[in-house]
Amino acid sequence: MAKETIAGLAKRLGISKASVSYALNGQPGVSDLTRRRVLDLAEELDWYPSSSARALSRSRAGAVGMVLAADPLLIGTEPYHMGLLTGIETALAAGDTALMLRMVGNDPVQERATYERWAGERKVDGVLVFDHLLDDPRPALLDRLGLPFVLHGAPETGVPHTFSRTTTDHAVDATTIVDHLHAAGHRRIAHVSGPHRFVHEAERVQGVRERAAHHGMEVLPHEANYALLAGQDAVTALLRAPEAPVTAVVFGNDLMAMGGLLALRELGLRCPDDVAIISWDDSLHCQLATPAVTALSRNPGMQGRVAAELLLAVLDTGAIRTESMPRSELMVRASTAPG
Amino acid sequence: MAKETIAGLAKRLGISKASVSYALNGQPGVSDLTRRRVLDLAEELDWYPSSSARALSRSRAGAVGMVLAADPLLIGTEPYHMGLLTGIETALAAGDTALMLRMVGNDPVQERATYERWAGERKVDGVLVFDHLLDDPRPALLDRLGLPFVLHGAPETGVPHTFSRTTTDHAVDATTIVDHLHAAGHRRIAHVSGPHRFVHEAERVQGVRERAAHHGMEVLPHEANYALLAGQDAVTALLRAPEAPVTAVVFGNDLMAMGGLLALRELGLRCPDDVAIISWDDSLHCQLATPAVTALSRNPGMQGRVAAELLLAVLDTGAIRTESMPRSELMVRASTAPG
DNA sequence: CTGAAAGCGCTTACAG
DNA sequence: CTGAAAGCGCTTACAG
């Protein structure tokens, strides 16, 4: 069977292509009866308009893009990304928009090349961008390319918003975490963060420092890279240090927290009796660990949904908007239970 | 700046659109000099041909689709899917093909509706299909739709191959697992599998049964649904049973194995001393558990790559091909260490 | 409310 | 090797 086209439908019904098009797209310009006949026939033939023809004549791709630029090793093990992706896809499906996915290891150059190409080819109508960087070149690039975007997880601080974004108040999260540790009696803690080039990590570091200062607590910062091994090494280094050891460690993600737990075990230290630990990301790993690890649940699925819905709205209206993420929730578990 | 088009490039260079097109696509019909000038100008202008115009005139979308039809709860926690996705995307990127991703909960009807729509809209040139089912309606549907596909993870048994697929020899995997347990002295084991409507689960169940029979071992089969809780319930039910308890349990995935471990702990049974456990899927969960869980590593990244490359080849040649998956590897850990 | 026609931006026979 | 033209399958002013 040859592929049916809009011309074929028009001929079968004895009307013009224009009428078929109007009927299909809910446009005025056709009688209700005609519209019904068109829709019924399309249904009966299992026919859908060609997406490329439609994209070409409308100058809209009907798809948005997303570049996952993360270490392939991390991406498989960190459940955060899959949750985010699920939320995004759910929102896009509801908005009848396709998701184009590209994975490019941890390579900023390839990420930018992908945007240039997508923009040039008019392959997507907009993109979702992750992990705001210090001096992030991407907003300017995307503006120059004329490619609409939403930056997910930008800080809440008062930079003028020249682009659309979702924000998280990391100071609030830091307060939640530090207050919890303070209440449990900790006065000297370590903070094993992700790379400071991520704006959200810089904000977290500052948030932890300030809130700790507020309580008169001391903080040892330690920059790491989100890998299990990095968390392990950090704890080994921190607790070997000559100064008085810390009694609690905050980890920037669940993998590093797992690494930290392993390191404590190797060092012969008990958790939480000797050292308490807490993760800035919740996951099944935290729940299954022994002891189960207290974690800040950020609900990646919801975050993805909000970001995708914002992008759809931006594409629809052309407006620049900011959307705040829902508040995180601290899941208190054994790893910080009062000894 | 108005979007540049092929007509614009032609005018700038004083040649015809056809020459520009030939030059861009590496077709014969232009002098080397002309080709160089075209490519240089495109590079200089950061120009790429419109994907929708190209798709329309070539009648090829330049994209393949993938419907992830799994429980959203599982998908976030099971690392298998993300690994698969990474492998697929890597291969597609190398083949200059875009990936269209759709997630549809555990809903076969929505999955099929997505294929019908993609085929009708000519949105993708082919699809990757997962989890072969008993009496799977999808191959016939896709054939009827004229949508090329690769079925990933079909059984190796000698059904005539009327479509392209990647196969895994589950009998070999079953042998690996059962032999390992037999060597450790187990004579009565349980097999907590995923749903038997999945062909690969049916094959695994049969494989385990046959290999166990070969060794004169006894197997208690137990069908479950891949969830943590299912593994937990299965172990609780199995070890409460009046008959002589089993000394080892084989789980269909890592989550159920984790659930099983929790159940053992609740029952006051030691692993591996009282009951050994083994997972049919490896992951960080298995590595981090206490005790670490012996698991069959299936290398999802490699599987994804092979499947995607096969699909690209199928699209290219139109041939029907079968590709075998590389052999799985047993990661022996403490959960089956001889007591 | 309906029809004939131009246009979206490419590719590809076909003549020269 | 190059150019003029038709065609891919839609959408959308514009006349009637």
Image (tube, coloured by chain):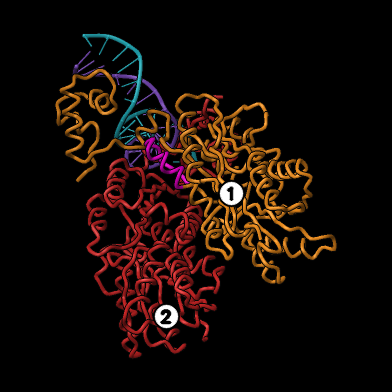
Chain colours: A orange, B red, C purple, D cyan
Q: Which residue is mark 1?
A: A296
Does residue A166 lie above or below A1 as drawn?
above
Identify the magenta region.
A86-101
Residue B31 can be seen, yes or no: yes
Residue A269 pos. (x, y %): 70, 68
Residue B23 pos. (x, y %): 50, 42
Question: Does the magenta-highlighted stretch encompass residue A94?
Answer: yes
Kind of residue at badge 2 = Ala
Q: Nearer the viewer, residue D2 or A311?
A: A311
Residue B172 pos. (x, y %): 38, 79
- Numbered disc 1: secondary structure: strand
Residue B298 can be seen, yes or no: no
Does residue A226 lie above or below D6 as drawn?
below
Does residue A304 lie above or below B174 as drawn?
above
Identified at 41% across, 37% down, the residue is B52
Identified at 71% across, 45% down, the residue is A208
Q: Quadrant of the N terminus of chain B?
A: top right
Q: Which residue is mark 2?
A: B248
Give the chain of mark 1: A
Kind of residue at badge 1 = Leu
- Which disc, if any, is residue B49? none
Is the residue marked by circle 2 packed among few (<14), some (14-19), or many (20+) residues within 10 Å?
many
Question: Does the magenta-highlighted stretch encompass residue B181?
Answer: no
- Numbered disc 2: secondary structure: strand
